């Protein structure tokens, strides 16, 4: 830190350290403020140097020659969890001082028991908790639940800003302000405040410096997990709930769902992680979903993108259900039963057959508040969805995967649509006309969407589009952007278009070829 202090300013200097970036804004304007942002952490080399100084004080910041390969690998693994943060690196280094000759078994035990060491009074690692606890206690009440919500997700999980905002809003974490200010605006402010307090790290940002995706650091997540007892239940291997009646939010990790066959009927949110077993999740949900009177979110996300099959009929499910994804369609009666879920905001279905299209469109007309729709066709089937006279008017995200019998004409009526994805549609007619007048369309991704040789973006169309992704357009030879087309485009990604010779010069500088 000392080497980064300004040298050209004379006189005395006051050094203030804080996890909250907003502290400097409280200083009187007459003071010159030099802000040194350490939230990005140390470089890997700097982190190794500090770590070695703590573990091996005689080594002058280098790895001793006598260290075995196993020990080196384990220390690297433990060090990686510190993610460049000086305090955890120093604390872990002090904790390991004099223990560098541990066997692989002891290293493994240490790796999985770090969280318990954080709670052990007098432990070298307890300093991390004592340092971070004031940051949590200092949170305003409206931010505490938002922060604890990150414990829903497994280690290293990166979540998009928009998804996080929607989840917070669905949980009623957002305190409504003035009528003219939306909940989304408040939710984004909440996120920005958590970032300023260095409790949340920005993974990706937009060109205007808005958070695109974020996560919590591993040691912040461990501290977070110590406070989640009354907020969230994580079902992991060998988990035995002390009192199933208190479970409100349930997140299932690998092997942990089996112990929850008898979880209570008060669960509001269920999140199945990528590692959880699909057969186990299906077994539990088939027996419980009709009785979960308070369930609002049922989201299952697996490593291979598979959904789960629940019941033949979800009509007995609670009317409070807001999110249902990703669910395998078993038959047309199952689709009919979805019509009773009038409050649904997100729906994800897979294994649709061609003959299911009309019934699904009839159901969609009843879901007036639907915001996200993700539909996938069964193998060797197509999506026949051009039967919706009155689609959900507030739909913001639409994803259609599978051959299209024809592009649904009702898409042009979706004036709130922001993000669209088409996969393997294989259309032969003009694929853009139905989309180019959507007033708020920001992102368009098309994979094997069009079999034609020329793609034309007409003059003055796609006025708000910022991101365009084209992939696997096998027959495409040329692209043309007429005057005034794509005026807000910031990013064009082109991948696996073997016959495409060039892109329009107006957008060439924005193009990435993959």
Image (tube, grey):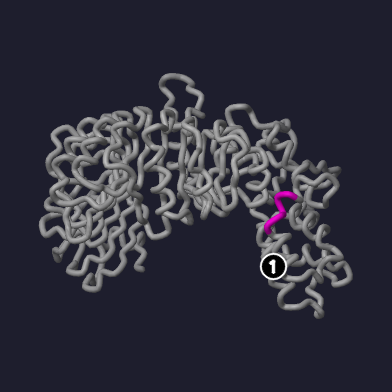
> Residue 341, located in which quarter of the rendered image?
top left
Residue wearing tag 1: 76
Q: Residue furthest top?
A: 179
Q: Which percent across, then down, holds residue 404?
A: 16, 54
Q: Residue furthest bottom?
A: 65
Please identify the dominant SS of the magenta region: helix
Identify the residue at horizontal 51%, vertical 24% (top origin). Answer: 175
Q: Is residue 390 left or right of residue 50?
A: left
Name above or below for residue 30 compared with residue 502. Answer: above
Q: Is residue 303 left or right of residue 331?
A: right
Q: Which residues are magenta?
A: 112-116
Q: Which percent across, then down, holds residue 282?
A: 39, 48
**Any part of residue 24 in sight:** no
> Residue 86, located in which quarter of the rendered image?
bottom right
Instruction: Give 216 or 462, whichever is nearer the viewer.
Output: 216
Identify the residue at horizontal 48%, vertical 34% (top origin). Answer: 267
Q: Residue furthest right?
A: 58
Instruction: Give 288 or 387, whichever is nearer the viewer.
Output: 288
Q: Name the quarter where the C terminus is drawn.
A: bottom left
Q: Which percent across, then down, holds residue 265?
A: 46, 31
**Any part of residue 69 in sight:** yes
């Amino acid at each position: 830190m000392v080497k980064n202090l300004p040298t050209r300013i004379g006189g005395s200097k006051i050094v203030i350290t804080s996890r909250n970036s907003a502290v400097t804004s409280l200083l009187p304007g007459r003071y010159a403020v030099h802000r040194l942002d350490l939230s990005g952490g140390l470089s890997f080399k700097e982190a190794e140097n500090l770590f070695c100084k703590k573990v091996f004080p005689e080594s002058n910041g280098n790895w001793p020659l006598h260290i075995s390969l196993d020990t080196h690998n384990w220390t690297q693994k433990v060090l990686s969890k510190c993610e460049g943060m000086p305090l955890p690196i120093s604390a872990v280094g002090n904790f390991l001082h004099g223990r560098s000759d541990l066997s692989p078994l002891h290293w493994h035990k240490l790796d999985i028991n770090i969280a318990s060491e954080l709670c052990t009074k007098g432990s070298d690692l307890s300093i991390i908790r004592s340092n971070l606890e004031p940051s949590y206690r200092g949170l305003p009440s409206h931010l505490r639940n938002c922060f604890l919500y990150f414990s829903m997700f497994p280690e290293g999980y990166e979540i998009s800003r928009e998804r996080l905002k929607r989840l917070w809003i669905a949980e009623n974490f957002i305190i409504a302000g003035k009528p003219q200010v939306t909940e989304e605006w408040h939710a984004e402010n909440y996120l920005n405040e958590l970032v300023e307090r260095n409790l949340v790290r920005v993974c990706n940002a937009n060109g205007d410096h808005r958070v695109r995706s974020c996560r919590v650091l591993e040691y912040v997540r461990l501290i977070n997990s110590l406070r989640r007892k009354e907020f969230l239940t994580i079902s992991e291997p060998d988990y035995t709930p002390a009192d199933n009646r208190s479970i409100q939010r349930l997140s299932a990790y690998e092997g942990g769902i089996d112990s929850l066959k008898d979880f209570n009927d008060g669960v509001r949110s269920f999140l199945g992680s990528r590692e959880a077993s699909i057969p186990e999740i299906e077994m539990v949900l088939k027996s419980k979903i009709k009785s979960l009177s308070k369930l609002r979110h049922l989201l299952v996300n697996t490593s291979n993108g598979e959904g789960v099959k629940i019941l033949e009929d979800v009509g007995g499910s609670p009317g409070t259900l807001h999110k249902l994804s990703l669910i395998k369609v078993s038959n047309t009666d199952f689709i009919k039963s979805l019509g009773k879920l009038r409050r649904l905001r997100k729906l994800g279905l897979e294994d649709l057959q061609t003959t299911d299209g009309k019934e699904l469109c009839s159901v969609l007309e009843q879901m007036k508040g639907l915001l996200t729709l993700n539909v996938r066709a069964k193998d060797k089937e197509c999506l026949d969805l051009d039967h919706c006279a009155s689609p959900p008017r507030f739909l913001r995200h639409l994803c259609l995967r599978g051959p299209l019998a024809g592009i649904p004409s009702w898409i042009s009526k979706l004036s709130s649509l922001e993000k669209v994805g088409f996969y393997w549609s294989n259309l032969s007619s003009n694929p853009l006309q139905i989309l180019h007048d959507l007033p708020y369309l920001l992102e368009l991704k098309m994979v094997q969407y069009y079999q034609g040789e020329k793609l034309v973006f007409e003059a003055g169309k796609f006025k708000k589009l910022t991101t365009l992704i084209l992939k696997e357009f096998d027959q495409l030879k040329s692209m043309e952007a007429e005057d005034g087309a794509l005026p807000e485009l910031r990013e064009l990604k082109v991948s696996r278009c073997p016959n495409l010779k060039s892109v329009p010069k107006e957008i060439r500088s924005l193009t990435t070829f993959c």
